[in-house]
């Protein structure tokens, strides 16, 4: 069976960010305050519907 490396796809990035947020026990609201993004913008990155690199960078920075 073939393996798919989702770590390089946008969906993989979103899943990684969601896992990071959850591991720190951050709600979408808390992360929104920390990043200056809206909860909807963060959710869109996490579910792969947004590909905005500036949003990804802001989330990564807030999560450390």
Image (spheres, grey):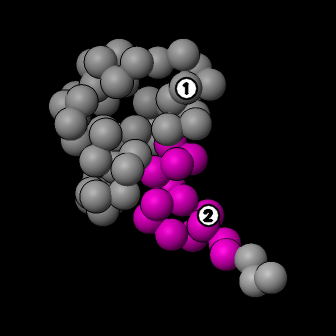
Q: x, y (%) of residue 31?
A: 36, 24
The residue labelled by disc 1 is: 22
Is residue 56 at all visible to an observer of this figure?
no
Specify start and end residues of the magenta stretch as a single range. Answer: 4-17
The residue labelled by disc 2 is: 7
Q: Residue at x 50, y 42 (%)?
A: 17
Q: Quadrant of residue 20?
A: top right
Question: What secondary structure predominates along the stretch shown in magenta?
Answer: helix
Q: Residues within 10 Å of mark 1 (few under 14, many from 20)?
A: few
Give yes or no for contact between labels 1 and 2 (Cβ–Cβ under 8 Å): no
Residue 11 highlighted magenta (yes or no): yes
- Left or right, residue 39 beside residue 22: left
- Left or right, residue 54 beside residue 10: left
Q: Residues within 10 Å of mark 2 (few under 14, many from 20)?
A: few
- Left or right, residue 36 beside residue 53: left
Q: Quadrant of residue 51?
A: bottom left
Is residue 43 at all visible to an observer of this figure?
yes
Secondary structure state at the residue bearing disc 2: helix
Q: Earlier in the sequence, mark 1 or mark 2?
A: 2
Instruction: Say above or below: 64 vs 52.
Output: above
Quadrant housing the C terminus: top right
Q: x, y (%) of residue 13?
A: 50, 56
Q: Residue at x 75, y 83 (%)?
A: 2
Q: Residue at x 50, y 69 (%)?
A: 9
Instruction: Say above or below: 63 vs 51.
Output: above
Q: x, y (%) of residue 4?
A: 67, 75
- The dot on residue 51 is none
Instruction: Say above or below: 30 vs 2.
Output: above
Q: Quadrant of residue 38?
A: top left
């Amino acid at each position: 069976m073939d393996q798919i490396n989702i770590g390089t796809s946008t969906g993989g990035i979103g899943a990684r960010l969601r896992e990071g947020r959850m591991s720190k026990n951050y709600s979408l609201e808390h992360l929104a305050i920390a990043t200056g993004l809206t909860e909807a913008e963060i959710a869109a990155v996490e579910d792969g519907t947004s590909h905005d690199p500036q949003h990804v960078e802001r989330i990564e920075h807030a999560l450390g």
